[in-house]
DNA sequence: TGCATTTGCCTAACTCGATTAGGCAAATTA
DNA sequence: TAATTTGCCTAATCGAGTTAGGCAAATGCA
């Protein structure tokens, strides 16, 4: 803002500020131009730290995936069964509600190799870990993993998009009951043996 | 493309072409500039038919919602119970896979009044109609509606984003089993009375 | 401490998309 | 055929993204 010499730009600072920006004004609006404005710097100055606009978004996405994986991982640690399921789901949803821009970023389309090196794989691993508390053999386990991913991403996506805004009851009530339902479903997954020794 | 006089632009033709464009190159890339190029026309010429870029996207979204509601409604007609559930889900998913750009458009954030006047309300009604075949009193019914919406939108969203691309088994297998699971879940929704006269 | 080198941000310049205002010719109507 | 409407164009502005090259501050080294 003040025209004072160097501001101390860094790829990392840009990405972090970009993520904050995304939370404030939306991931799509988190552009190099706006970011430069925030730093009191000319847009061109960003280009020594970030390759281009797409690169910036990719880095924000990777940061969000990382943060989200950390939160979920911390929440799930030491829990099992429904307890773990709930902790996972709530950590995921809470992150999305607290960081809507980052959440959108986490769903940004990454090219295959970037995705493979991202924290997205930790998400998959953690989802699978949740199912350790239930009795699901393959391929049922994979199907269940995908169901959980679908429900979480779908519900939170709809919620953050305002999909539940103009109807009762509030989203929280549905969320709680849906987690109960998912737990019941996982314990009695059709086609999988009910473990009854 | 040929500089021949008038091309016959219409709001309707623009929106329809815009939807096709979205399916080909992505909803975000379905811009006035690209659309004008397709019609062999200057960008400025679109502005007598469409207010601006946002208006264009809104209209594409409304078209997609309408089409999707029509497809789903046709598929569900005359069916009940699991049959209806499956028909609904498959119509929804098939539409998304065949029209990825339109599907993204259907999830475009509309302002409240536009949304209220859109075919989005038909979607909500139809989802609720599915549950007629199951025995769910309020508020369970609403929670179940939201679960279904979450699963469908979540699964298809992940699938079209390539989320299931690099793992076995294929998405279709999971989809089928997830529908089985949802049916079972709806028939034994926790907290709701199992209708056993 | 002084100099050389790196490096960070700037200016300048270009391209392209969105948008508005106003013009001219084709289509429509009478 | 004359009058009017209407459709697409030209011209022009603004802002975003991006690249190339410059100058000064920071840093490294003697």
Image (cartoon, coloured by chain):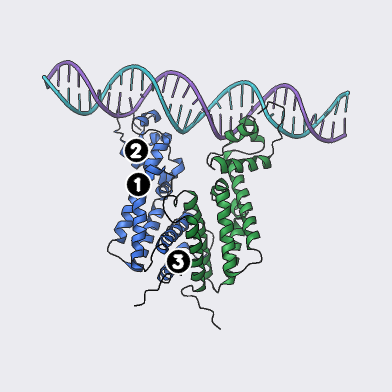
Chain colours: A blue, B green, C purple, D cyan
Secondary structure state at the residue bearing disc 3:
helix
In the image, which disc is placed on residue A178? Answer: 3
Q: Earlier in the sequence, mark 2 or mark 3?
A: 2
| Quarter of the figure with residue B12 | top right
Q: Chain of mark 3?
A: A
> Where is the C terminus of chain A found, in terms of image quarters?
bottom left
Question: Would you name the residue on which mark 2 appears?
Answer: A14
Q: Is residue B172 above or below residue A135?
A: above
Question: Would you name the residue on which mark 1 appears?
Answer: A118
Mark 1 touches mark 2? (CB < 8 Å): no
Q: Earlier in the sequence, mark 1 or mark 3?
A: 1
Q: Earlier in the sequence, mark 1 or mark 2?
A: 2
- Give how far apart the Cα atoms at labels 1 and 2 are: 19 Å
Q: Is residue A80 visible?
A: yes
- Residue at left offset 38%, top offset 65%: A137
Q: Chain of mark 2?
A: A
- Give how far apart the Cα atoms at labels 2 and 3 are: 38 Å
Residue D22 point in image, percent of width and height: 33, 16
Residue C11 point in image, percent of width and height: 39, 20
Mark 1 touches mark 3? (CB < 8 Å): no
| Quarter of the figure with residue A30 | top left
Does residue A3 appear to the left or right of B113 in the view shown?
A: left
């Amino acid at each position: 803002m003040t025209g004072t010499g160097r501001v101390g730009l860094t790829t990392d600072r840009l990405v972090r500020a970009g993520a904050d920006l995304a939370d404030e004004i939306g991931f799509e609006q988190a552009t190099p131009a706006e970011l430069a404005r925030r730093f009191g710097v000319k847009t061109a100055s960003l280009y020594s730290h970030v390759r281009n606009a797409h690169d910036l978004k990719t880095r924000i996405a990777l940061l969000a995936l990382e943060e989200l994986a950390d939160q979920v991982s911390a929440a799930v640690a030491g829990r099992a069964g429904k307890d773990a399921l709930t902790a996972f789901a709530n950590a995921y949803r809470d992150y999305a509600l607290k960081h809507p821009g980052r959440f959108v970023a986490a769903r940004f389309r990454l090219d295959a190799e970037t995705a493979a090196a991202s924290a997205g794989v930790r998400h998959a691993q953690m989802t699978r870990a949740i199912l350790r508390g239930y009795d699901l053999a393959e391929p049922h386990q994979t199907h269940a993993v995908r169901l959980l991913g679908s429900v979480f991403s779908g519900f939170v996506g709809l919620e953050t998009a305002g999909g539940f805004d103009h109807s009762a009851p509030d989203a929280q009530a549905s969320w709680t009951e849906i987690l109960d339902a998912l737990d019941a479903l996982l314990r009695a997954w059709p086609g999988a043996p009910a473990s009854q020794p």
